[in-house]
């Protein structure tokens, strides 16, 4: 028995994550009314908005972030490493600060927001603002992982591919990309998950307008602060947790099965 | 086909200035690591851009700093194989070799030939991690040769393999070389490998070519003390030459017939080229001989290296004796010997300031 005594600590750590989730479930079963929430249109609206915005933010992170990560990782310049570090900054900022930062730029009085408003485009407190907030907060998770992937590939693979006559694009598509695929997939999952849970920056920059900017986390906070209290909040929370778990499982299966790197 | 290289530049703090050309031959670039061998190959392949100079492959100028020409690696037709093969880990053998040329009938035909030539017939569906080191290198060679190639660049391709595998691959490379008729630049820091493979050897040190010559001339007639050191000459002494004679540590020695140097020189002789003779008390000493006593005897299994101190005039000398003559001559039991430094095996080099 003593030989396996060391297991106690890791097991306790695992329980640290599992028990609160179980608590959530138990609480939802006893106090809450998950059925009522599931039947409520507002829950589905918030869920749909969450999934839509998080997926859109991820798509933007992939489309814009992959070339950026590749360029930064390929560059030998010292400013490239500095830039890579700066792009990590949103990871350590409290999301609320990120929200304020976004307001200073894209808000109605912001540096870009004001000229845009004059042109008739208003970003803050729109669904687009939700995506921007999520991209700002969650995008670095993808960037970071993609950058590490590109920086970690042996540059000789590229060199050899060039001598074999493969163009830069073919080399990227057929050699580099398959090699960094696990990093990209892992980063994408993290980014999407983080975007789905985004609260602080969204609240400040996009507000909490049902059907427009009220994502699941915001709906949960709103329920918590309303007369429904904790009981209402846990019911929605359980739906979000269940849904997120389902999608994560699907995503893992998808990235493993479809990845060109097998 | 030919390759002509005349390049100079700097990588980090290291500067190089390399000029060489090769025809349809196996030219070995030999030197210690960090001598500038790899950077030369990378410049030919187009993966490194020198600051000055010119490179021509099969009469096509692929790089000319003065005229602003620098063809990308894709357009140079230089096959490049690196130390650990760098096969793409996510592709099987067939796709590794044919990547980018899957639809070329010519490439398919050459792949069929190369599979047989390199003995990798049954590996098409294997992944690199399922191959031995030797198989990986063969596949890497096939990958470089399956497309039209005008020069083959091999950067220590065998140094990560064990000795038995290397032997086999080396002889295969010699065979392949006969079939291909194209210049092969082979980088190595292994003296035996250089000796076995080379038609000609370029000895590189500190980013410069110290000597480019036929294999035998590099080994028998090094141009400088440094070349002699790099090619494993262990007896090197200062001396004063006068045409066909030289004085080393007070001992006059006869030099090879083609020697013409005068003044301060370095004199060298490979330790396995020195002869030991039995000492006859009343006989005269022949030319290039002196009496010396064994002060050290190092056994290396199949050879012994003896260190001998002269009794009168003459240098301290290292003599390598194969195990068999060592036993037959009973070297272990005898202290005093006549050491002969045959004139033809003496190397004489101008002393560089």
Image (cartoon, rainbow, N blue to C red):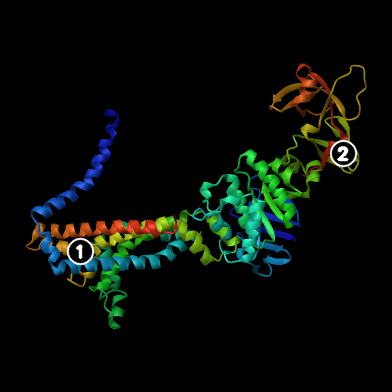
The location of residue A93, given as percent across then percent down, is 29, 58
Residue B241 image label:
2
Q: Is residue B107 left or right of residue B346?
A: left
| Number of residues whose C-alpha sits closer than 10 Å to that of mark 2, classed few (under 14), some (14–19) or many (20 or more) | many
Point out the image quarter for the C terminus of chain B. Answer: top right
**In the picture shown, does residue B192 fall above or below A70?**
above
Residue ID at (69%, 62%):
B53
**In the picture shown, does residue B215 fall above or below B108?**
above
Which chain hosts label 1? A
Residue reaching furthest to the front: B122
The answer to which quarter of the image holds residue B44 is bottom right
The location of residue B178, given as percent across then percent down, is 75, 53
Name the residue nearer the viewer: A50 or B246: A50
Which chain hosts label 2? B
**Residue position for label 1:** A216
Instruction: Report the Cα–Cα distance between label 1 and label 2.
Output: 94 Å
The answer to which quarter of the image holds residue B321 is top right
The location of residue A212, given as percent across then percent down, is 21, 73
**In the picture shown, does residue B333 fall above or below A180?**
above
Name the residue nearer the viewer: A68 or B236: A68
Q: Are marks 1 and 2 on the same chain?
A: no
Q: Is residue A76 left or right of residue A145?
A: right
Residue B220 image label:
none
| Number of residues whose C-alpha sits closer than 10 Å to that of mark 1, classed few (under 14), some (14–19) or many (20 or more) | many
**In the picture shown, does residue A6 fall above or below A55?**
above
Helix, strand or loop for disc 1 = helix
């Amino acid at each position: 028995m003593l030989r396996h005594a060391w297991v106690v600590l890791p097991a306790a750590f695992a329980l640290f994550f599992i028990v609160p989730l179980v608590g959530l479930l138990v609480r939802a079963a006893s106090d809450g009314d998950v059925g009522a929430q599931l039947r409520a249109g507002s829950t589905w609206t918030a869920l749909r908005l969450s999934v839509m915005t998080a997926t859109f933010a991820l798509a933007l992170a992939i489309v814009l972030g992959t070339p950026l990560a590749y360029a930064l990782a390929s560059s030998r310049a010292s400013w490239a490493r500095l830039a890579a570090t700066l792009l990590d900054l949103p990871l350590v900022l409290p999301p609320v600060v990120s929200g304020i930062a976004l307001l200073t730029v894209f808000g109605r009085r912001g540096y870009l927001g004001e000229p845009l408003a004059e042109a008739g485009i208003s970003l803050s407190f729109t669904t687009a603002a939700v995506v921007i907030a999520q991209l700002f907060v969650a995008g670095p998770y993808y960037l970071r992982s993609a950058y590490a992937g590109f920086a970690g590939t042996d540059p000789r693979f590229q060199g050899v591919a060039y001598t074999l006559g493969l163009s830069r694009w073919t080399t990227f598509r057929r050699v580099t990309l398959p090699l960094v695929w696990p990093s990209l997939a892992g980063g994408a999952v993290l980014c999407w998950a983080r975007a789905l849970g985004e609260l602080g920056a969204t609240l400040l920059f996009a507000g909490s307008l049902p059907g427009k900017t009220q994502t699941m986390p915001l709906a949960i906070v709103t329920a918590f602060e309303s007369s429904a209290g904790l009981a209402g909040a846990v019911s929605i929370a359980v739906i979000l947790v269940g849904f997120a778990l389902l999608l994560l499982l699907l995503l893992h299966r998808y990235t493993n099965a479809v990845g060109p790197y097998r | 086909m030919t390759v002509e290289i005349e390049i100079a530049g700097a990588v980090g703090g290291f500067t190089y200035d390399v000029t060489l050309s090769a025809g349809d031959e196996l030219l070995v670039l030999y030197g210690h690591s960090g001598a500038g061998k790899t950077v030369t190959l990378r410049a030919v392949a187009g993966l490194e851009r020198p600051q000055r100079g010119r490179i021509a492959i099969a009469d096509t100028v692929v790089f000319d700093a003065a005229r602003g020409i620098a063809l990308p690696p894709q357009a140079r037709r230089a096959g490049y194989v690196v130390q650990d093969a760098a096969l793409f880990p996510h592709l099987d053998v067939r796709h590794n070799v044919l990547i980018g040329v899957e639809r070329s009938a010519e490439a398919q035909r050459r792949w069929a030939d190369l599979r047989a030539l390199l003995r990798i017939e049954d590996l098409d569906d294997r992944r690199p991690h399922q191959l031995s080191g030797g198989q990986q290198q063969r596949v890497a060679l096939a990958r470089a040769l399956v497309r039209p190639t005008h020069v083959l660049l091999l950067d220590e391709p065998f140094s990560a393999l064990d000795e038995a595998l290397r032997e086999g691959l080396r002889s295969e490379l010699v065979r392949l070389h006969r079939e291909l008729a194209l210049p092969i630049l082979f980088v190595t820091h292994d003296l035996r490998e250089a000796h076995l493979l080379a038609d000609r050897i370029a000895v590189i040190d500190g980013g410069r070519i110290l000597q480019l010559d036929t294999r035998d001339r590099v080994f028998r007639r090094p141009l400088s003390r440094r070349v002699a050191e790099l090619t494993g000459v262990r007896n090197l002494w200062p001396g004063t030459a006068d045409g066909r004679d030289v004085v080393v540590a007070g001992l006059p020695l006869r030099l090879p017939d083609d020697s013409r140097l005068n003044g301060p020189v370095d004199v060298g002789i490979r330790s396995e080229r020195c002869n030991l003779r039995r000492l006859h008390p009343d006989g005269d000493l022949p030319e290039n001989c002196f009496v010396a006593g064994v002060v050290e005897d190092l056994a290396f299994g199949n050879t012994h290296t003896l260190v001998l101190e002269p009794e009168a005039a003459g240098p301290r000398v290292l003599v390598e004796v194969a195990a068999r003559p060592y036993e037959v001559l009973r070297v272990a039991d005898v202290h005093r010997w006549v050491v002969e430094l045959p004139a033809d095996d003496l190397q004489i080099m101008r002393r560089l300031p």
